[in-house]
Amino acid sequence: MTEIVRMDKAGVTRAAALLREGALVAFGTETVYGLGADATNAEAVAAIFQAKGRPRFNPLICHYPSSDAAFRHVVADERARAIGRSFWPGPLTLVLPRQPDCPVALLTGAGLDTLAVRVPDHPAAMSLLRQAGRPIAAPSANRSGHVSPTCAQHVLDELGGRIAAILDSGPCKVGVESTVLDLSGPEPVLLRPGGVSVEDLEARLGPIRRGAAPTASKGLRSPGLLESHYAPDLPVRLGAVSVADDEALLAFGAPLPGARCCFQLSETGRTIEAAARLFEGLRWLDAEGSRLGLRGIAVMPVPDTELGLAVNDRLQRAAAPRGQ
């Protein structure tokens, strides 16, 4: 049963407590309603994908109560700080490199070395973010591929019974998603048009390149685009029923015997736990396997149930020939 929470002091306190406990809470912003989870809790973030029925792990936007809070987790140059001063709070998302000590779960950014951050312009959202005391990952609060919601009833129609609560923040004033601007490289790139016009951004930054479809080597920087995410340097072999002496093992369930280097996705066979640990596991095995002189990563089968479909989509991309 999904709880409808009023936009008052008690309601915001209740919604913030649920988020800190790892539950999913939808809340209104100036753009659309977001489906929020504690961005530092990988299993809570995995639950977003499960609730939305997302077949793939797209990067999610992290929401913060201030630009100072956002810039503690990303590397912000003077361009980013100037744009933040001009457009935050507001319907603009910036994609920037992660800080080395960034506490945001790797799953939130789909395993990439960048993070999408924004400061929403809505009193309920700002109050919720301050009380939660941590970054909140929040894609639109609808089933994957459906129309984005702009009122609490839309969210209830889409996700009722799938999430813990909806903070009824009233109708959204903008009604379209935030603009996504990539400032992770020397050239500004518009990845998604939205609530801030590119003309307004160019008035402050100069020419902005429109984003092209990402390649396998570059990866996805933003929500709402086709993606090819971080792939380890070591080759990935799927469907492993045995592990060679020179392979690391990504295990699901009881691990195969003989692995010198093993990372467990879920000993009990839970696909939501596997999703939460996937990117951490690939990175760890890549580094540890390379240190040990291993030649590849063997991956045990993961069933295509619940989040297993998304896990396998990501693994298939990681295992694809490097030239694709």
Image (cartoon, rainbow, N blue to C red):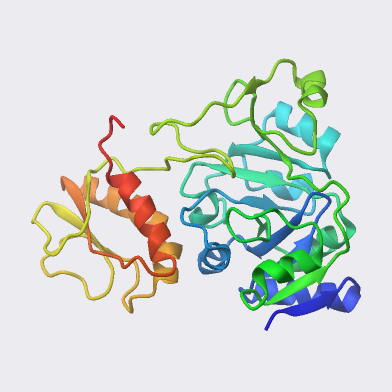
State whether residue 63 appears in this view: yes
Q: Indicate left or right for 102 with 20 as reference.
A: left
Q: Indicate left or right for 117 with 260 as reference.
A: right
Task: Please name the residue shown 78% across and 31% down the image.
Answer: 83
25 over 118 or under it: above or below: below
Q: Nearer the viewer, residue 33 or 131?
A: 33
For the C terminus, the image quarter is top left
In terms of image quadrants, where is residue 212? top right
Looking at this rendering, what residue extends furthest in the bottom direction? 1
What percent of the width, then of the height, locates residue 188? 64, 24
Q: Nearer the viewer, residue 235 or 198?
A: 198
Q: Indicate left or right for 312 with 76 as reference.
A: left
What percent of the width, then of the height, locates residue 165? 72, 75
What percent of the width, then of the height, locates residue 183? 63, 30
In terms of image quadrants, where is residue 1? bottom right
Q: Indicate left or right for 322 with 80 as reference.
A: left
Q: Nearer the viewer, residue 129 or 272?
A: 272
Q: How many marks?
A: 0
State whether residue 293 appears in this view: no
Task: Please name the residue shown 85% across and 49% down the image.
Answer: 121
Task: Please name the residue shown 48% across and 44% down the image.
Answer: 112
114 over 299 or under it: above or below: above
What percent of the width, then of the height, locates residue 233? 28, 40
Task: Please name the residue shown 49% across and 56% down the image.
Answer: 107
Looking at this rendering, what residue extends furthest in the top direction? 207
